[in-house]
Amino acid sequence: MKRRILLLLTLIILLHTFPLSLWVQADDFALRVGVLDTGILYRHDGLKEVKIEPGENLVFPGYNTTDLLGHGTRVAGLIVKECPDATLIPMVVVSRYLSGLKKSCNALEIANAIIKAIDEYDCKVLNLSFGLKEDNEELRRAIEYAEKKGVVVVAAAGNNKDTESNIVFYPAAYETVIAVNAVDEEGKPAFFPKESYSFISAWGINVPVLSFGFSINPPKASGTSYAAATVTGWVSELLRNNPDYSPAQVRKELTMENK
């Protein structure tokens, strides 16, 4: 009896001395990454060990977030390749009808998806492997809100050819967004974002990606979408090791490493 009382008193002292948070498993501190894309194929063999939460379907509200197009699954695979411990939150902003016809969210709906990912799903990093060709006030405000909340936003800079370098893509063009261009394995730029962008580069040409559907050979893909996913993985790993970093500190760190 005395031994039990002693053990109980010891436990009480320990709980009183150390914050309760220190007793919580490390998984409760997992970095949450919002993947605004086509969804994620949860049962993919390449994602079996990945933490993926249900997220939300903004294209077809009430439906699940299973990927029907493949783009989001490939993006997810590249993110966790760089940061295996990230928790992915799929936010579907592009999908398709059963007929195969695509349906996409408009700028206002994308802005709402950004805010939802922050406020309702507690995401600390957002990956947007797409871009809109027109500026939008609601989208701009959502990006400003992300910065205010300490959330890092990574976006594809656009697959511009050298004759299209005057085309601007949003949200990549916004000042606080980490815009990502794609380079080949030798570091040569593959696309030509508008020069006013403040972007960094990552491998985005013939990148090995997760298969989707029937594929005999290991699939490869090209584009700033996939380069952005890789950078999102870098950002996620950086924040796991430096959870107090602000978005500005993350951008500074990436810029220094990308020189």
Image (cartoon, helix red, strand yellow):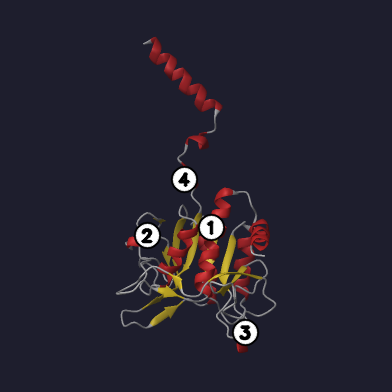
Q: N-terminal of the two: label 3 or label 4?
A: 4
State left or right for residue 186 relative to residue 97.
right
Identify the mark at residue 47; answer none if there is no mark.
2
Residue 231 lies in quadrant: bottom right
Task: Look at discs 4 and 1 and give the one toward the viewer.
Answer: 4
Residue topped by disc 3: 167
Where's the N terminus, which quadrant? top left
The residue carrying pointer 4 sits among few (fewer than 14), some (14 to 19) or many (20 or more) residues within 10 Å by Cα, namely: few
**Vertical side of 254 occupied by 70: above or below:** below
Q: For the residue marked with disc 1, what is the amino acid?
A: Asp
Total label count? 4
Task: Give the secondary structure at mark 3.
Answer: loop
Spatial CA span between label 4 and label 1: 17 Å
Determine if residue 40 is in view: yes
Task: Look at discs 3 and 4 and give the one toward the viewer.
Answer: 3
Residue topped by disc 1: 119
Spatial CA span between label 3 and label 4: 42 Å
Q: N-terminal of the two: label 3 or label 1?
A: 1
What's the residue at 37%, 69% (across, down)? 67
The residue carrying pointer 1 sits among few (fewer than 14), some (14 to 19) or many (20 or more) residues within 10 Å by Cα, namely: few
Q: For the residue marked with disc 2, what is the amino acid?
A: Leu
Q: N-terminal of the two: label 1 or label 2?
A: 2
